[in-house]
Amino acid sequence: MRYPEGMALQNKFPILWDCFLQRINDALKATTQEELGRRLGVGKSAITKWRHGSTRGADLQDFLRYCDVLGIDFCGIINGTPTPTYSPSPFEIALTGVLDSFLSVHNLTHEKAASSLWPETANGAAKLGSILTAKEPLTPEVLMQLCLLMEEDPGKLLRLARERVQPEGEQISGNAKSA
């Protein structure tokens, strides 16, 4: 990895950490700490400690994995040339979380689901993983194929995602949500 002339990694860490916390906070608009912790491979308490500033504890390998899951261009930030990354909406994050949960409920691994979606593709599980961690866009076609595979109503999954983003009783566009 090349660093900008005279720029040590420790000088870039505050930028990385701020980006990391922003992605954590963005993700929590659409999911729970438990779900996000599951995606990152940490407990709910680790996320709480990060957000409250009581710890920045993670070794570099773990931090790189967290950045990858959250779609943070670690190398680009370090080198001063971040590449544009896909930035999902809170609804998209919620929907991919719902889909990932439903795949687990139906005992479908990413490998099994990907082999049904893209039988000719060798890296289908990685592609599905990128979609389900909201690093790549979820297309309507993939959503419908996953719903067919799980024999689930797409409307049900969309409603569940909407509820994660807009909990019942909160205002939507100035109008109270009807019960």
Image: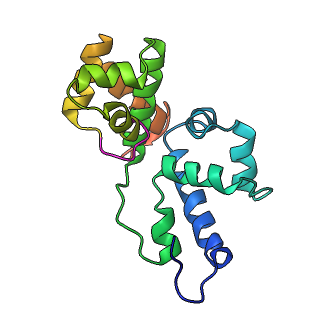
- x, y percentage for residue 144? 22, 24
Q: Nearer the viewer, residue 134 or 58?
A: 58
Majority secondary structure in the magenta region: loop
Q: Is residue 67 magenta?
A: no
Q: Nearer the viewer, residue 165 or 178?
A: 165
- x, y percentage for residue 90? 42, 45
Quadrant hosting residue 145? top left
Q: Is residue 142 above or below residue 81?
A: above
Quadrant of the frame with the C terminus: top left
Give the extent of the magenta segment: 132-137
Residue located 60% across and 89% down the image: 6
Q: Nearer the viewer, residue 118 or 40?
A: 118
Would you say residue 88 is visible in this rendering? yes
Is residue 157 toward the left or the right of residue 35 in the image? Answer: left
Is residue 67 toward the left or the right of residue 61 in the image? Answer: left
Q: Is residue 74 above or below residue 100?
A: below
- x, y percentage for residue 124? 31, 32
Would you say residue 153 is visible in this rendering? no
Residue located 24% across and 15% down the image: 148
Color encoding of the figure: rainbow
Residue located 55% across and 63% down the image: 19
Q: Is residue 40 above or below residue 63?
A: above
Q: Is residue 22 above or below residue 49?
A: below
- x, y percentage for residue 173? 36, 46
Residue furthest to the right: 54
Is residue 52 toward the left or the right of residue 122 in the image? Answer: right
